[in-house]
Every structure is written in structure tokens, then in C-alpha cells.
Image: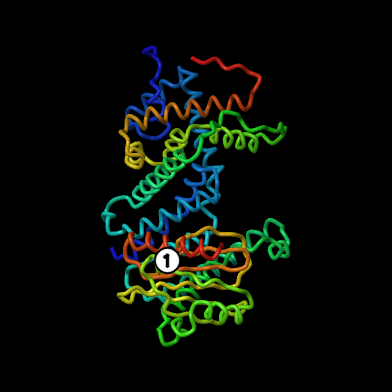
Amino acid sequence: MSEDRISDSELNALVDGELDPARQAEIEAWLADDPESASRVARYRAQNAGLHALYDDILNEDIPPKIAAASQNSRAGVPPWAAMAAAIALFVVGAAGGWIVRGEAGVAPVAQVAAAPRIDTQELMVRASMAHVVSHEDELRAVSTSGKAGVGDYLADRMGKPIRVPSLESFGYRLIGSRVLPDTDGPAAQFVFADETGKKVSLYVRGEQADGVDITYALADDLSMFYWNDSDRSYAMVTRVDDEQGREALLNAARMVHGQLSR
Amino acid sequence: MSTETKRQAVVAEVPRLRRYAIALMRDRTEADDLVHDVVLRALDKLHLWREGTNMRTWLFTIMHNLHANEMRRRSRMLDVVPMDAAPPRAEAAGQEAAVELSELSGAMGNLSPLHRQVLLLIGLEGMTYGEAAGVLDVPVGTVMSRLSRAREDLRRKIDEGTHTATIRRVK
């Protein structure tokens, strides 16, 4: 590199505003006599402007519901109900924003109805969380008296479709009961497990036809859940988790149940 | 600063995290999955963020580490397919601005991920060399040399995309 050429790093530093003002003025003066360097500076600046033109629209997009839900995690002592209410409000805002954007693009609203539906994460989260919080043992249908097959039949009768009864015995969790709960599109089922210390994990199953979702993590205050779906049901495993280990354990439990139910 | 205020500060950065992730990964689903994981991790580790330091660079650092882990995991699982071939282009007269952007987008896609990272952190996110060095966990000198090569490479790829018939002299 010849001495009268401006160095690569100084050209870049000029573009990025990393030079001190005196040096910047000096380099800018030199550029007048160095068309090649001047053209490179212009090209680099155009690259930056192009990147903004390509990607800045993303800044104005609605935050996807999944990320909005994840960001509801708060350890500031907000009661779970408040966090859930905030999650619902966020979802409603997001949906409204979507309508406006699509309206401007000139797409008929009917097209939205026809599009493959996405799993309603917020609805699933709220229902599974509420069911988990109010799952006292005396409200559940005990498994011990009727046996597993009995519970399955009982739920199948009420949900109108056979459902396997998952087992978490290998994780040290015993099925302590299950029940049928009202949901928007008919009855939902809940299975509640507990370990020997009484720590509970529950599985919420609701009828929902939506695009497939892999096992995904979500948080509602101090309740953690992993949710997923198959062709006509969505599932959420819920528990109170306070560390990464607990979350890992819940994920493994969710994987196991997912495997059992999709067989 | 209360935990709730910090949480809000994390949420406020989500649009920028998404812009960077989408530009870097070039796949919205994957990018949103990454941002989702960054938000979870950040809220989990909120007590580790030191007040008075830059929340944005802290979040970008978390994102860089999660992304790097994921890339390492994938490179162990999958054969890496080199992306040398430029995407097919359509000639469109009278739409120069639009064509240039699509050229830029295509050329960005053909950059190495390391070059893309540094170019986006500085050119798009407006980080200083020092901030980018912190996010990428490399010395400032490395950021500068990478950036310089990235810009030249991008310039070359755009030119090749625009004038495919022209043979460029490589110095």
C-alpha cells in the first residue's frame, strides 16, 4: 500500500465516525485528491443506507405473540393473574395491528379466515396456567380407584375422542388425578402429577386445529410451560420452576409425554 | 432500578434484536425463535446485568452467544452446504432502487456469517468498534479488519451481481 493512499482502517473509521474530529477533517480533505478512496467511502455509506432500507421496517412490526409471551416473565412480585391479563391484552393489540397492516395491503379479511390457523398460544397459556393453579387434589377425579384405562375412557367419553393417559413415573411423578374442564371449543382435559414432595406438574389438553408447533417454552410469571400440538389438539405441560435445571426437567417430561401421546 | 423497569428495558430492545436476527439469519422463524430464547435468557439473568452499563450490547452479547452455540450444534449435526452461487436475478429496467436493494440483499446472503455479523452490528445497529468487539468477544483490531474485508467483499459481490459478464480484477 503506497504512503499517499489512505489506509483501509481509516477509510472505514471515517465511515463509522470513529475518527477524532481533527483526523476526520484531514482525511476528508485528502479524499478530494483520491477519487478511488472517495468512491469507496461513498460505496460503504451506500451499503449502510441500503441495510437500513432493507431492514428498518422490521422495527415497526408487532412483536410476535410468542416473544411477547416470553417477555411477560417478571420476578417483581406481579401476581400471576396480572401477568396473564397483560398477556391477553398484548395478544389483542397484536391481532388488531395485524388487521390494519393486512387491510392496507389490500388483502380481503376473508383470506385471513381461510389461512391455516396458528396455535392460540395465549389462550392455551392462560387456560393451562389457571387450571394448574386451581388443581387441588379433591377437585380431581382420582386415578387410584378407576385405574388408568378408566380415566382414559372417562375422558374419551367427554372429549369425544380417545386420549392416552401419559405417565411420568420414570421422572418420579405419579398421576394423582385428572378432570374435564370447559374450554372454548368443547371440553378440555387436565392430568395432574405430583412427586413425593407434593410438587405438581400438570398437562392441559385442549381441542384445537392449527399448524403444527414443536415443543416450545413459555412463561407466565413463575409458571413455566412447554406447549406443542398435533393435528387436532394442543398440549401444555405446566409447573412452577425457579431455575434452569427445573426447566430442563420439565422439557424432558414434556418430550416424554409428547412421545407417549403421539405414538 | 426495579426488576419491572429492567424487564421493560429488555422488551424495548426486542424490535432491534429482531431486526438484527432477521438480517443475520435470513429466516424469520429461526430469527424469532432466537429472539425468544434471548428474551427468556435475559429475564432469567436479569440480576447479572449491571446498572449503568449498556442494556442493548448486553442483549446482543447474549444473542451472539446463543446463536454461536446453535451454529456449532448444527455444524456437528449437518453437512454444511457452501452458498457460493448467487441467486438468480431478474433484469428490471426503471426500478433501479429496488434492484439495488435486492442485489444488496442477495450479496448479504452470500457473505460469510462472520462478515455479516460485523457489518450489521456496525453498519445497521450503529455500534462503535468497541461495542461490537464486546458483543463478538474479539479484539477491536479484529473487528476493524473483519469489517474492512466484509465491506470489500460485499462491494465485490454486489458488482458481480450487477455485471455478471464483467470479470473483476482481483488485487
Q: Chain of mark 1?
A: A
- Asked if residue A115 lies left or right of residue A170, the reply is right
Q: Nearer the viewer, residue A191 or A21?
A: A191
Task: Decide which of B35, A158 is in the foreground and name it.
Answer: A158
Task: Give, as a three-letter code, the residue at label 1.
Answer: Leu
In the displayed structure image, the side of residue B69 where residue A189 appears, left or right: right
Q: Position of residue A198 (x, y in %)?
A: 33, 77
From the image, which quarter does the N terminus of chain A lie in?
top left
Rendered position, A41 above or below B14? above
Across and down, in percent, residue A72 comes to 42, 66
Q: Residue A69: x, y in percent?
A: 47, 64
Q: Picture quarter containing residue B87?
A: top right
Q: Which residue is mark 1?
A: A219
- Decide: is A134 above or below B80: below
Task: Identify the residue at horizontal 71%, vertical 63% (top origin).
Answer: A114
In x, y percent, where is residue A174? 39, 74
Q: How many marks?
A: 1
- From this viewpoint, which residue is outermost toward the bottom? A138
User: What is the secondary structure assignment of the residue under circle 1?
Assistant: strand
Query: Residue at 48% across / 74% down in the picture?
Result: A128
Quarter-of-image position of residue B89:
top right
